[in-house]
Image (cartoon, grey):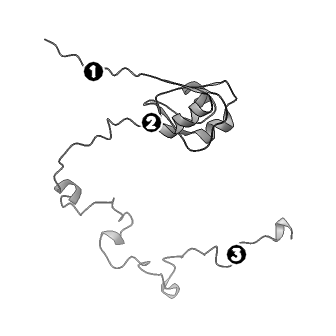
Amino acid sequence: MQLNDLRPGHGANKERKRRGRGTGSGQGTTGGRGNKGQNARKSGQVRGGFEGGQMPLLRRIPKRGFNNTQFATVYEIVNLADIEERFEAGEVVNAENLKSRRLVHCNEDGIKILGNGELTKKLTFEVDKVSKSAEEKIKKAGGEIKLIEKVKYTAKKDK
């Protein structure tokens, strides 16, 4: 078999429907859009949730309560298995080194180490959080953990 012999499987590529090509085609005249109305027009597609000018359901329902998603702390997670294969013994595992090895992208809220995988190298961890299973495995391998304390700024009240 040669590369020029390769063909897609039977039924893998369907021909597109050629609408509006006469009554004999089966998709002629109205082209499957029905007769008249907004959806029969050229630009008849409306955005999701649009109800023809009626107040949409999403705006009719009252919004109550507090949602913490915009204020929640979201940690970037890194597993011990990834650290094991990308770090040498004696190295420091911190935000800069993790970013240079493409294990984290942007660590605005912080980095958390999870215990998925095994660790055999003695490493120093300078991160925001470590899970209990990861902490046990790091200590067992002879490594140490230095947790970073983040300062939270609050608005001062004027007296």
Corner quadrant of residue 91: top right
Residue 47 in the image: state x and y as whole percent.
Answer: 33, 58
Q: Position of residue 33 (x, y in %)?
A: 39, 76
Distance (Cα) linking label 3 and label 1: 63 Å
Q: Tell me: residue 60, above or below residue 13.
A: above
Q: Secondary structure at mark 2?
A: loop
Q: Are marks 3 and 1 in contact (CB under 8 Å)?
A: no
Residue 154: mark in rendering: 1
Residue positioned 82% across, 71% down in the render: 5
Q: Who's the residue at 57% across and 73% down the image? A: 16
Looking at the image, is mark 3 or mark 1 earlier in the sequence? 3
Which circle's residue, 2 or 1, is located before the other in the chain? 2
The N terminus: image quadrant: bottom right
The residue pinned by badge 3 equals 9
**What residue sits 50% from the left and 76% below the top?**
19
**Residue linked to disc 2:** 75
Residue that protrudes farthest toward the bottom in the picture: 24
Q: Residue at x 42, y 22 (%)?
A: 149
User: Which disc, if any, is residue 12?
Assistant: none
Which label sits in the foreground, 2 or 3?
2
Q: Position of residue 74 (x, y in %)?
A: 41, 37
Q: Amino acid at mark 3?
A: Gly
Q: Residues within 10 Å of mark 1 (few under 14, many from 20)?
A: few
The local secondary structure at tag 1 comes to: loop
> What residue type is disc 1 on?
Thr
Apparent side of residue 158 relative to residue 69 in the rendered image (left or right): left
| C-alpha span from label 2 to label 1 | 21 Å
Point out the tag, 2 or 3, that comes first from the N-terminus.
Answer: 3
Looking at the rendered structure, the secondary structure element under dot 3 is: loop
Q: Name the residue nearer the viewer: 84 or 135.
A: 135
Q: Say whether residue 57 is left or right of residue 33.
A: left
